[in-house]
Image: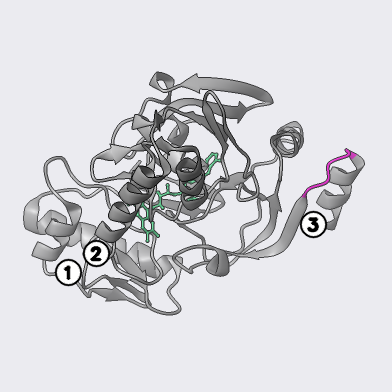
């Protein structure tokens, strides 16, 4: 790492970093080993300069937000991570532009203050906006695709502005899963409202989420199959409480898997496989994972 840091410095690139980044500590599921190094750029310029350096030097890297829908690796991750958490600027003027690392709660605080409605469905989703744009996050029939106007991305030393249509959104899917662009920020299409109404809707959304399992998880593990619910199928297959090591199928919401202590990525992968096999055997339905998995330094869609 010393050599990488020296090379960055000699290229005039300074950026906050953390060596031996602990995935178990920083992910919502509390799983994983270390990453050799994680960078925390604070501005878009710092981010693009860092990315330029990796591209110029043909180095792979990974971009992560709040690590709330990602299953980290058990072994040490050799490639650098860029964490967007410190890209926190927001602009509420004629349009609304937010940087990728803004959290859902920070966005909603600003929406309240500026009287903008439309993003309240994000209340309680522990995401960064970059992660939400990538995952097309949403709940109760409302998704990021409903409010994304344009996305600013970095790809291979170029900046590019994608409109909503070019994001190829569908249920829990986006174009970003197929290209290696870095989401820098997003322009949102929100409606004029007032602080009181935004606050009331946000509160209501949060109340409706109260029954979701508490504890270390990645939220829903599987996408809902067309016309059905993954949780219903898993429950009907009698799999609530099924365990592999420290990973357990939640007893209250069968599409959640919890780390009940010391779970590894391998525990989760084994549990996922067992649940998929059982549901397929019982109902002939192939469940598709919603979560992203870091395997051998790469983010894998384990469905493909
Ligand atoms: C308790 C709990 C409840 C949840 N409830 C919901 C829910 O109701 N609805 C829902 O949709 N999800 C839910 N989730 C899942 C998760 O919060 C969302 O998928 C969220 O959008 C992930 O955001 P993140 O910042 O944590 O992304 P991460 O997990 O850090 O990353 C997810 C993916 O996005 C990519 N990515 C992240 N940022 C960028 C960027 N700037 N540029 C390029 N790629 C990027 C990563 O490489 C990765 O592939 C829940 C999770 C938990 C733990």
Q: How crowded is mark 1: few (under 14 residues within 10 Å), some or many (20 or more)?
A: many
Residue name at image x 28 percent, y 60 percent: 207
> Which residues, given as a range, are shown in magenta?
11-15
| Quadrant into which the C terminus falls | top left
| Percent x, y of residue 210 | 28, 64
Which residue is denoted by mark 1 in the rendering? 239
- The answer for how far apart the CA atoms under marks 2 and 1 are is 9 Å
Q: Earlier in the sequence, mark 3 or mark 2?
A: 3
Q: Residue furthest right?
A: 10
**Residue 168 vertical position relative to residue 254 in the rendered view, above or below:** above
Helix, strand or loop for disc 1? loop
Q: Which of marks 3 and 1 is nearer the N terminus?
A: 3
Whether residue 67 is visible to the viewer of this picture, yes or no, is: yes
Residue name at image x 13 percent, y 64 percent: 235
- The answer for how far apart the CA atoms under marks 3 and 1 are is 44 Å
The residue closer to the viewer here, 277 or 107, is 107
Q: Which of marks 2 and 1 is nearer the N terminus?
A: 1
Whether residue 182 is visible to the viewer of this picture, yes or no, is: no
Which quadrant of the view contains residue 278? bottom left
Q: Residues within 10 Å of mark 3 (few under 14, many from 20)?
A: few
> Which of the labelled discs sits on residue 276, or is there none?
none
> Which of the labelled discs sits on residue 274, or is there none?
2
Point out the frontmost of discs 2 and 1: 1
């Amino acid at each position: 790492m010393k050599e990488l840091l020296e090379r960055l410095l000699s290229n005039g690139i300074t950026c906050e970093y953390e060596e031996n980044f602990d995935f178990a500590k920083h992910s919502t599921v509390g799983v994983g080993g270390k990453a050799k190094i994680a960078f925390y750029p604070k501005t878009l310029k710092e981010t693009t300069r860092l990315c330029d350096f990796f591209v110029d030097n043909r180095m792979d890297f990974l971009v992560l937000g709040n690590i709330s829908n990602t299953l980290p690796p058990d072994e040490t991750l050799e490639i650098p991570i860029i964490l967007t958490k410190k890209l926190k600027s927001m602009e509420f003027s004629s349009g609304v532009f937010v940087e990728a690392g803004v959290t859902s709660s920070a966005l909603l605080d600003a929406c309240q203050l500026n009287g903008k409605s439309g993003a309240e469905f994000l209340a309680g989703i522990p995401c960064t906006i970059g992660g939400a744009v990538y995952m097309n996050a949403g709940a109760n029939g409302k998704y990021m695709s409903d409010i994304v106007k344009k996305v600013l991305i970095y790809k291979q030393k170029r900046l590019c502005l994608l409109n909503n249509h070019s994001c190829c959104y569908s249920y829990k899917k986006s174009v970003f899963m197929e290209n290696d662009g870095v989401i820098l920020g997003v322009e949102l299409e929100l409606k004029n409202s007032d602080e009181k109404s935004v606050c009331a809707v946000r509160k209501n959304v949060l109340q409706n989420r109260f029954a979701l399992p508490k504890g270390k998880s990645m939220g829903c593990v599987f996408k809902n199959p067309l016309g059905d619910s993954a949780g219903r199928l898993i429950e009907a297959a009698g799999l609530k409480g099924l365990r592999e090591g420290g990973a357990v199928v939640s007893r209250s919401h069968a599409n959640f898997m919890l780390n009940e202590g010391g779970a590894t990525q391998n525990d989760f992968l084994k549990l996922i496989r067992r649940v998929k096999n059982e549901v397929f055997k019982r109902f002939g339905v192939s469940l598709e994972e919603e979560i992203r998995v870091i395997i051998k330094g790469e983010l894998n869609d384990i469905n493909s």
